[in-house]
Amino acid sequence: MHDVLGWLDDEAARRHRAGLHRRLRPRAADAAPLDLAGNDYLGLARHPEVVAAAVEAAERWGAGATGSRLVTGSTALHAELEAELAEFCGFEAALVLASGYAANLAVLTALGGRGTLIASDAGNHASLIDGCRLARAEVAVVPHADPAAFDKALDRHTGRALAVTDSVFSVDGDAAPLPALAAVCRERGAALIVDDAHGLGVLGEGGRGALAAAGLAGAPDVVATVTLSKSLGSQGGAVLGPRRVIDHLVNAARTFIFDTGLAPAAAGGALGALRLLRREPGRAARARSHAATLHGRLTAGGLSAARPDAAVVSVRAPSPEAAVGWAEACRAAGVAVGCFRPPSVPDGISRLRLTARADLTRGALNRAMATILATAPRP
């Protein structure tokens, strides 16, 4: 019999040779290493109040949503979360989906289409890239964080147009120049779509997000997407924007219409985290402060690290193999760090990616920094 999937073995061998093989690492529920790898920016995923809210939601509404949002998957809890999330972030309305990935696909496919131009930052997350591909629009990939490049791309188009960017880029932790991008969009008649996954909970007054910080929240030509799985410590995603945009997504976004609604426990946990953040707005500033501390100490120790604009600190490694070995050494010493390699990084540079959680103690920060410096690859 012809081995129709034999090519997979060749692909696996190629990944191994290049140092790019990935594998799953199931983690235990307890005795976990010091975590600088996840995206729990505010330390809320295990907060007793957030966990209790998730448990209460599951007990009241059941383990699953039971159907798509347009059939049986919308509960009063989903509506409550949408209303409070929109109000907190400063937008007219919100729509909750099963993931941040689904939220980005929803916005770009429903607002794109043939005849539309999408100008997309070269550093955008994979979900935005996939959304552009699925939108059946003309796509112009522009140089990273360059408003002039967006202006040039949008200038030659006369139909509908969108400019798409992350607010905080997940690889290096740098922030997009949102006010300048908004000015370009308004000059060229384009809508601005911003993925604020890494800004919500970290940037803006009390963690209201990058668009609130830039004075763009609630603008009639701005749409944001967020995830509930980072600062809010839960699961799921949401779109924030003018009410007419949200109404259009309910009627046209395939990842909303044809996907099962977000599980009640996730919606309840996210709502509990949002309410906790309202009461403890200082968590956002602590996450940013810890990121600055990590950057300062590691660069003082001779490492090359990008200056963080939010809670992500990116530290360069000399090669994919060195990055993997470095991350393994950190883990063996009890510190979990992220390891980013091609094709996850658009510039081909391998990195350790560190998360500066708001709940880290000074002792934990010192331990993490000492471990990273002690295990760094030698030139």
Image (cartoon, rainbow, N blue to C red):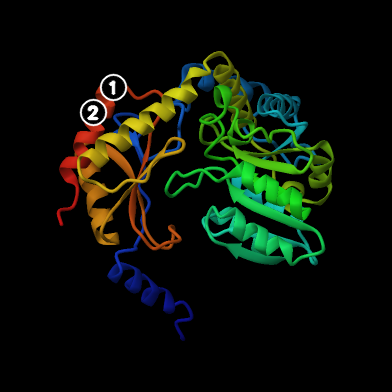
Vertical comparison of 90 with 252: above or below: above
Which element carries disc 1, helix, strand or loop? helix
Categorize mark 2 by other alpha carbons within 10 Å: few (<14), some (14-19), many (20+): some
Residue 113, percent from left and from top: 78, 62
Q: Are marks 2 and 1 in contact (CB under 8 Å)?
A: yes
Residue 339, percent from left and from top: 34, 50
Vertical comparison of 19 with 32: above or below: below
Q: Is 318 placed left or right of 43 in the picture?
A: left
Disc 1 marks a residue whose amino acid type is Arg
Q: From the image, tell me which residue sits under label 2.
A: 366
The quadrant holding residue 269 is top right
Label 2, label 1: how many angstroms apart (C-alpha)?
Answer: 6 Å
The quadrant holding residue 70 is top right
The residue furthest top is: 279
Q: Residue at x 56, y 22 (%)?
A: 206
The residue furthest bottom is: 2
Vertical comparison of 7 with 357: above or below: below
Check residue 340 in the rendering and tell me which mark sits there, or answer none.
none
The quadrant holding residue 210 is top right
In the picture, the quarter occupied by the C terminus is bottom left
Residue closer to the observer: 312 or 271: 312
Check residue 362 in the rendering and tell me which mark sits there, or answer none.
1
Q: Is 285 placed left or right of 338 in the picture?
A: right
